[in-house]
Image (cartoon, rainbow, N blue to C red):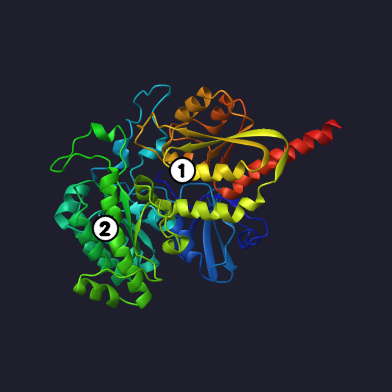
Amino acid sequence: MPKMYGWVREVVPESKADRAGLQPGDLIRTINGHLVRDLVDYRFYSAEEELTISFARQEHEQEVHIAKTFDENLGVLFGEEPAPFIRQCANKCVFCFIKGLPERFAPQPGLAHGMRASLYIKDDDYRYSFLFGNFITLTNLKERDWQRLDEQKLTPLYVSVHTTDPELRRRMVDGPRAGEIIEHIQRLGSMHLTCHTQLVLCPTINDGPHLDSSIRELAELRPIVESISVVPVGLTKYNNMLKTEDLPPLRHYTREEAEVIVDQVEHYQRHFAADNADGGKGAYVEAERNGADIASGVGEPFAYLSDEWYYLTKREFPSAKHYGSYAQIENGVGMTRYLIDQWARTKQRLPTSLPNPRRVTLVTGTMALPVIRELAEDMSKVERLEVQILPVVNQFFGAEVTVAGLLCGHDVLAALEENQNLGDLVLLPRVMLNNEGVRFLDDLTVDEFKQRVPVQVEFVRNAQETIEAIRLLGVSDTVDALSSS
């Protein structure tokens, strides 16, 4: 039996769907005669004001009519993935994340089996790009996909470009129609769709003059292209075992090389910031003609450096104004600045003191250590609160992998077990876990993790949750004192 989308998991009480009689277990088949193939279809067709919904209940076909305001939520929650099938990637990118993983069922030290199963899904699905900001290559779109993009106006999309040089992109991406990226983006524009793009840079492959050309050519496609993110290639020890054909060996950037990249991109940022403030391409074109830089204007820079470049070069992070709407924050662009500013706004909510002495351990990856130290200094101003930082070296993927989001549960456990005094509370970044917040990359569950840590463990998403966890330490002390009196 083919997989179908539309199984209703929950109906919000008193919602439009509830009042119309929809129930958990119903299978929504069509809305206004349109087949519901996935979450994108459901959101698009249910936006209308007059709806006729056909559904199956215990193999009996039924129909309800609902009148609502435009875009009003029906109150239906689905109990499945956003699509019954995810579009698999047919490319063979030289730096593919999947190549940086061990084989799915290869035995690993301390692990019953390989990594979390979802990590091995090599997706290149435009629906997930629209819904969640996943990056796609635009190489696997069939004509019916282009038609659907046009009909449903799925915008913006997030596109991995890497280079605008057709031949180099064919070699790097090694996929069908990889060299047609400019034509594909132009076609998006003809449908009044936009995209955010990324350039994953590999030393001596697509940087240098290729980076110049890519930024310039993508700039000519504004406003179809809304932004460019420049990201350094991320490699694990498993990538280092691979050979690249017809390309230089893959490796990480040195600090000196990163300095060159930052200077190169900042040159364009000054152009684009002034260009945007000027309201058009005139300032940029004039500067190119004169061969001169433009002082930073008030506009957004269009081309952005991911946070790794600033950590690697030890340069100061730009202001929030630089990042504008943080359109590529999930790609690591502005994430650190957002945290710094968020902490500055909320740290006054820290308690001035705790009723009893308490010790908190902050777990982090090695890259973010300088910023976490600044947060810890503020926390240490709370009377009777001692704060220690535990940076975890990534043993599983290799020490050069420094972000917290790629730390495996067993590596974190090993670091915690080596520490002789974890105190009363261990705080870990929520980004270590999957979307549901139940598993690490290495399939270790949160419940299994907590069973092996002798103190309280909390996973926090942001500054507010961090401060709330510390405040609750004081609350628990007060409750204990009242209950014992």
Residue 63 image position (x, y, % from top left): 55, 61
Task: Please identify the quarter of the rendering in which residue 468 is found.
Answer: top right
Give the amino acid type for the residue marked by disc 1 in the picture. Answer: Pro
Q: Compared to 226, does 1 lie above or below? A: above
Give the residue at x 35% y 45%.
312
Give the labeled residue for mark 1: 370
What crowding class fits label 1: few (fewer than 14 Cα within 10 Å), some (14-19), or many (20 or more)? few
Residue 23 visible from this viewpoint: no
Mark 2 and mark 1 in contact (Cβ < 8 Å)? Answer: no
Give the amino acid type for the residue marked by disc 2 in the picture. Answer: Gln
Q: Is residue 182 left or right of residue 228?
A: left
Q: Is residue 356 left or right of residue 25?
A: right
Q: Compared to 83, does 272 lie above or below? A: below
Task: Please identify the quarter of the rendering in which residue 446 is found.
Answer: top right
Which sits in the foreground, 431 or 44? 431
Residue 261 image position (x, y, % from top left): 27, 53
Task: Please identify the quarter of the rendering in which residue 402 is found.
Answer: top left
Give the residue at x 12% y 43%.
246
What crowding class fits label 2: few (fewer than 14 Cα within 10 Å), some (14-19), or many (20 or more)? some
Q: Compared to 356, does 281 lie above or below? A: below
Give the residue at x 20% y 48%.
172
Label 2 residue SS: helix
Q: Compared to 346, does 149 lie above or below? A: below
Give the labeled residue for mark 2: 264
* Marks 1 and 2, the one that precedes in the sequence: 2
Residue 31 image position (x, y, % from top left): 49, 63
Give the residue at x 41% y 43%.
1
Q: Is residue 377 left or right of residue 314?
A: right
Residue 93 visible from this viewpoint: yes
Label 1 residue SS: helix
